[in-house]
Amino acid sequence: MKSQDIAQRWISFFEARGHTAVPSASLVSSDPSLLFTVAGMVPFIPYLTAVEPAPYPRATSVQKCIRTADIEEVGQTARHGTFFQMAGNFSFGDYFKEGAITFAWELLTTPQDQGGFGLDPERLWVTVYEDGDEKDEEARRIWEDKIGVPTERVVGTGKADNYWNTGQPGPGGPCSEIYYDRGAAYGLEGGPAVDETRYIEIWNLVFMQYQLSAVRSKTDFDVAGELPQRNIDTGLGLERLAMILQGVENIYETDQVRPVLDRAAEMAGKAYTGTEDPADPHHADDVRLRVVGDHIRSSLMLISDGVTPSNEGRGYVLRRLIRRAVRAMRLLGVEEPVLPVLLPVSRDAMKGVYPVVETDFERIARVAYAEERSFLRTIASGTARLEEALEGAKAAGTPLSGADAFSLHDTYGFPIDLTLEIAGEAGLAVDREQFTALMEEQRQRAKKDAKAKKTGHADLTVYRELHEAGDTHFTGYDELSTESAVRG
Ligand code: ATP
Ligand code: MG
Ligand code: MG
Ligand code: MG
């Protein structure tokens, strides 16, 4: 089943059950405290928090999402994209746990010729909230007694994994997740608490039930009482379900991403092998191809929603995605511009669901190609400077100084991994300790600046997601494998 058909089937199923179909909102979140729309519930926040009365008791959507916090996972796990689509159903004071669980099970397990997705019920595991003495016994009883899932496949997990709250006083409540067992070839037996690679999380059900009076951390809060209006918020990863229904190994091999990956492999003259095993010699190249497939699509979708590259906020995320994709292609041996080849492939894979990527393609392409050209110029001029510095270091018999590496990175936007690679080829080490120290100093400065600015500009809270991702510098470039090392 194609991704587009999965989305349509989702919407029809919930429409037939009294839900109002709501089109996807923009990736640029309407909630000023978020950089991007990170979940299907974001456009419904005013209704879920009862700030505004909901115009309908039930809603359903397939929402475009960006999660920059997952960027390091892309290509490494089977299941994390920076862009993905979250299918959801929502109840605003209407049905609650039993309704949500029953709908989810019915949709997943009803045969495909009868309107469902036809998953084998034996492969499904679920979690319910259980933390010490606190247990969501109501959810467990529904799963076991009403649906008939055997006790051993209903796993209790605690606050860290299975409790939703906003981080502030307000609504909160237990979750229940649905996992798909990919089989013994993918990892250890024993359920999702043991192995989240073999058991893939596909659907998260949130039961908004309590009013929280104090939230000290994700796992430490006080419950003041029941909410006057109990809500349901659910989210299923469309790409994850597509991966199962299309019988492929990961979300990058599904129909909306795979064409880009294949075209990238062709450009590089590499055969994509699909390995997930880091010990496999093809792994590094496969990860790069998966990163390219993911990042090209994310860039297309971000530009189509009005984001343009810049050195801060949303624009910086886009810049980073484009540069990472270009850099991954260089590591695969392709040095000429890649976006003019790959972006149209991504457009063609996405236009069925999002016609605007075709009708607005001229503008989208202009923005994207200009960014790649500017990055390639950066690389070219940086390489000349680096070669000078390398000659100096060679003559002096020292490693390349951290200050040189830092100035290349900071002033010229020249990626540190490229410095390491070219220095390595010239037989020279780089003083990475000094480089890291200088990066850290710069990070502290940026933090101070951001704090100082915050007093003047309330909307700087849009940086929240960046900070959460551990990303506090707004210039420069991060690469695939040495990134965490240089970030410290
Ligand atoms: P995981 O634990 O696998 O990272 P999650 O618990 O962070 O997932 P939720 O916040 O519960 O994910 O989001 C709801 C659903 O959206 C998930 O069950 C999953 O199917 C999907 N999803 C979440 N993050 C991603 C992602 N980065 N790429 C693709 N799908 C995702
Ligand atoms: Mg996650
Ligand atoms: Mg999870
Ligand atoms: Mg989850």
Image (cartoon, grey):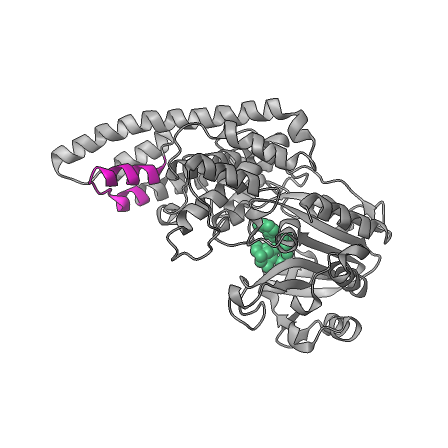
Residue visible at 54% across and 42% down?
294
Residue visible at 26% across and 34% down?
404
> Whole-percent x and y of residue 361?
62, 25
Q: Is residue 274 visible?
A: yes
**Is residue 433 highlighted in magenta?**
yes
Query: Which image quadrant is residue 63 in?
Result: top right
Q: Nearer the viewer, residue 128 or 181?
A: 181
Q: Is residue 219 visible?
A: no
Horizontally, is 284 left or right of 127 in the view? left
Query: Which image quadrant is residue 457 in?
Result: top right
> Whole-percent x and y of residue 20?
83, 46
Horizontally, is 3 left or right of 12 in the view? left
> Whole-percent x and y of residue 470?
47, 48
Residue visible at 30% across and 37% down?
419
Q: Is residue 185 above or below residue 113?
A: below
> Whole-percent x and y of residue 276?
47, 55
Q: Nearer the viewer, residue 342 or 414?
A: 342
Q: Is residue 171 above or below residue 297?
A: below
Residue visible at 51% across and 54% down?
77
- Which quadrant does ligand 4 occupy? bottom right
Residues shaded magenta: 415-436
Q: Is residue 336 above or below residue 331?
A: above
**Is residue 202 highlighted in magenta?**
no
Helix, strand or loop for the magenta stretch, by majority: helix
